[in-house]
Amino acid sequence: MPSKREIRGKAKQVKGKADQVVGKAREVAGKARGKPAQRVKGKAQQVRGKAEEVAGKVQSKVGRARRKAGEALERAGSALEKGGRTLEETGKQMEKGGANLGKAGKKVK
């Protein structure tokens, strides 16, 4: 399941794309009306939109990497916990074996 950071990054990407589309529309409208200031504002909005889209991509990738790292750490922790239990059980079995060996040694004497 995607993390909040991944989702926010995707939302930022969509907003950036929308700004690019609106900026392009402003630029074209300014060109058609002969208003250079509107064209420049439209172009600037496109640049801001592209920057926001890229920032969203980065945010999504960072979120995904953090999520994957967390999942890997959880798996490693589970494996260590399982290994610890197995080691503990082996130790108990060895103690029993040692006690049984001691009993057998007493019988032999």
Image (cartoon, grey):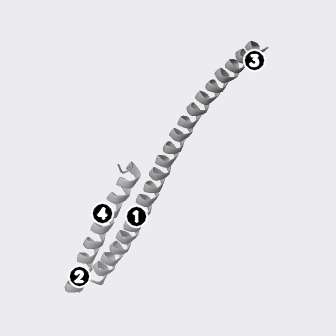
Disc 4 crowd rating (10 Å Cα; few below 14, some 14-19, many 20+) is some
* SS for callout 3: helix
Disc 2 crowd rating (10 Å Cα; few below 14, some 14-19, many 20+) is some
Q: Position of residue 83 (x, y in %)?
A: 57, 37
Instruction: State if disc 2 and disc 4 touch (CB < 8 Å).
Output: no
Q: Left or right: where does residue 100 sit relative to residue 71?
A: right
Disc 1 crowd rating (10 Å Cα; few below 14, some 14-19, many 20+) is some
Q: Which mark's residue is nearer the viewer, 4 or 2?
A: 4
What residue is rendered at 28% in x and 78% in y? 38
| Residue denoted by label 4 | 14
* SS for callout 2: helix
Q: Give the alpha-carbon distance from disc 3 to disc 4, as whole Å.
A: 78 Å
* SS for callout 4: helix
* SS for callout 1: helix
Q: Left or right: where does residue 20 sit relative to residue 86?
A: left
What residue is rendered at 71% in x and 17% in y? 104
Identify which amino acid the numbered label 4 is placed on.
Val
Instruction: State if disc 3 and disc 2 touch (CB < 8 Å).
Output: no
| Residue denoted by label 2 | 28
Label 2 or label 3, whichever comes before in sequence order: 2
Q: Position of residue 6 (x, y in %)?
A: 38, 54
| Residue denoted by label 1 | 57
Identify which amino acid the numbered label 2 is placed on.
Val
Label 2 or label 1, whichever comes before in sequence order: 2
Q: Position of residue 20 (x, y in %)?
A: 30, 72
* Depth order, front residue of 84/67: 84
Identify which amino acid the numbered label 1 is placed on.
Lys
Q: Give the alpha-carbon distance from disc 3 to disc 1, as whole Å.
A: 71 Å
Label 4 or label 2, whichever comes before in sequence order: 4
Mark carried by residue 105: 3
